[in-house]
Amino acid sequence: MTRSPRLQRVRDLLVGIVLALGAAPAAWAQSPTPTNSDCLTCHEDAALVSSAGKTLRVDAERFAGSQHAALACVDCHADLRQTAEFPHREKLAPATCSPCHDETESRFRRGIHSRSHLKLGGRSLRCADCHEPHAVAPASDPASATSPFRVQELCLKCHRTATPETQGRGQGFVASYEESVHARALRKSGLAVSATCVTCHGSHETARVTDPSSRVARRNLPSTCGSCHAGILAAYRQSIHGARAAAGDDKAPVCTDCHGEHTVERASVSSSKVFARNVPETCGRCHADSRLVQSRNLATNRVPSFRSSFHGIALRFGELKVANCASCHGYHDILPSSDPRSRVHAGNIPQTCGGCHPNAGTNWARGAVHVAEPRDNYAAHLAREIYRIGIAGSMGLFALYIAADLWAFRRRRRGRA
Amino acid sequence: MTSASEPESFVRMTLGERVQHWVLIASFTLLVLTGLPLVVYEWGPLERLFPIGSAFRVRGLVHRAAAVVLIALSAWHVLYVLFTPRGRETARALRPRSKDLRDACEILMHNLGITAWLYRRGVLRGWFFRHPYWLFAESPRYGRYNFIEKFEYLAVVWGSFAMISTGFFLWNVELAMRIFPRYVFDVLATIHGYEAILAFLAVLVWHMYNVHFAPGVFPMSKVWLTGRISRKRLMEDHPLEYEEIVARGKETI
């Protein structure tokens, strides 16, 4: 059964008022509230277990070192405030964090984790699922369960196997983060500023990618990645891709379309989507999609004409120094050739080609780079057609001569026999 | 002159000519092997031959090294043709004449035997009786080089010229683009590729048939190794040359 958060809050408030009114006179009549040492009398004993066999021990030393050291047990376990009889009853109301963390609580209520989940036996996530209740530490403490170095273990406890909506991705999609450059930066280089699950997805307010308010929703992705990669975000915003995405074209690429999500890797790693050899395929996902190309009025045949060029063939055969799409067009700052700022604008071609070919002059701009159709280079087309006819014609004549020669040989042999 | 005093075989290729042919075979084979990947690049298994790294660059180096050999060979051949008596004589014998075109048509008609077949069935019997040439009853008689050999030689000359002149500019992109615009460069690249296909197929189909697989030649004509041709084959394949040798009383032309 689900109740709307607002109704629940109203109910909680009413229950609180009734309880407070009913309990107040009794409280005055009874003994003072139990102190932390009162509680620890029993709860320091490792042998203390619940009827389900779970330990009920509280590590006093860790608690004393935690953020909550100054709090009394009954500040969170509020229903024990008035208890005089010990041992108290086993079933208590869950500890509440909202009296202090109300802002965080309301963000949590907006997120997907405040709804019930199968993996949790039908309940929603509780604060204590992520924050060790008696040893809570800030995320900046490397020992904290929510520190950048450990937070992914926390998320993967559920998400290694269960992704609520896999969106066509296989299991392990989330865990593939562990192989990414972000995870390696944390694990190997100890970079606390590297992206963890919560850097991109948010923590308390985590929402589905389909939720427009989500940090990982398409519209919000550039600024999410840009919160660390600010310089790249600025270049991207100037590019045609960034401009189209900002204008609301949902097919315009955002960061993850070229870099991948969890598997994001350096361009120098061969599995990366932006590894030199994989670039044509990555760009081709949109630029070789004929429907998308037509609907956006983009140039056709860009990918096949690259693949059949010397650059394309050399790249296919493992020569990484050769030009790929990004070498000439740029990447984050990519612009259409009609824009005078574009690297592939006719006026900038000598400079762009000159990056690899020393002393490239204006001749480099005279003629199409992507040759796919006859009109791209009529002279080359004519040469090709002449050769095709010539090759077919000469092979035909050879075949005719050889067939006649063999046939005559057979006739002669039969005549002799 | 009696046949008893004639040698059993005659020189057809001198050692120098054979060395030229061996060098041509070596450079041509290397050029085809290292150039073909650029033509049939879409063939899947090729990618395994070129792992990420320098394999493709090595291919280019070998290709250009073989090209240098071909260029040197061409220069040697030009000098040979211009400045040695035998070279000049050979080049003259290789010059195409109208007889070659006639020979080609005659041997084709002779082998097909269409007119002879029509004659046997009684079609135009009187006309054929008056014009027996059109029955192509005899195969044409060749001199030192038949039309096939002349065509192959000229194809090598033309092919080498086309490949070397275009290949030079593909090798020196920056120099080429200083001389002409990009679209001309693409034309040169197109010519280089298609001329290569033509040359490869011509050697594979035409030359391999004529010197290996043709009846009477199979498994191989040994002239390119020994340089000598037997009297029997010379009389059969190059009767006009044989008659000339007999008339002149020399071992070779």
Image (cartoon, coloured by chain):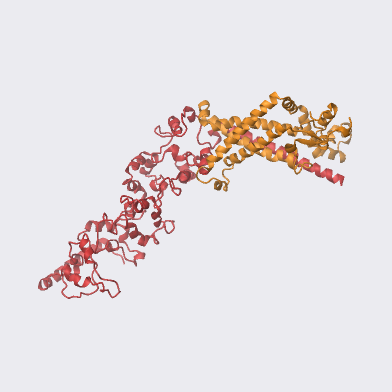
Chain colours: A red, B orange
Q: Is A174 situated above or below B148?
A: below
In front of the other: B147 or B84: B84
In the visual, does A404 lie left or right of B74? Answer: right
Comparing B4 with A237, the one in front is B4
Instruction: Work out whether A119 lies above or below B17.
Output: below
Please say if A204 is above or below A272.
Answer: below
Residues A348 and B192: in front is B192
Q: Can you say which quadrant of the picture contains the N terminus of chain B?
A: top right
Q: Taking A285 as reference, is B195 left or right? A: right
In the rendered image, the quadrant that contains the C terminus of chain B is top right
Q: Nearer the viewer, residue A99 or B210?
A: B210
Residue B196 in the image: x percent, y percent?
A: 62, 36
Residue A80 percent location from the top left of the image:
18, 70
Quadrant of the rendered image containing residue A12: bottom left
Q: Position of residue B182 (x, y in %)?
A: 52, 30
Judged left or right of residue A134, residue B89 is right
> What residue sits 67% from the left and 30% below the top?
B157
Can residue B112 be seen from the camera position used here? yes
Residue lying farthest left? A29
Position in image of residue B235 (x %, y %): 83, 35
Q: Residue at x 80, y 39 (%)?
A: B111
Q: Is residue A307 visible?
A: no
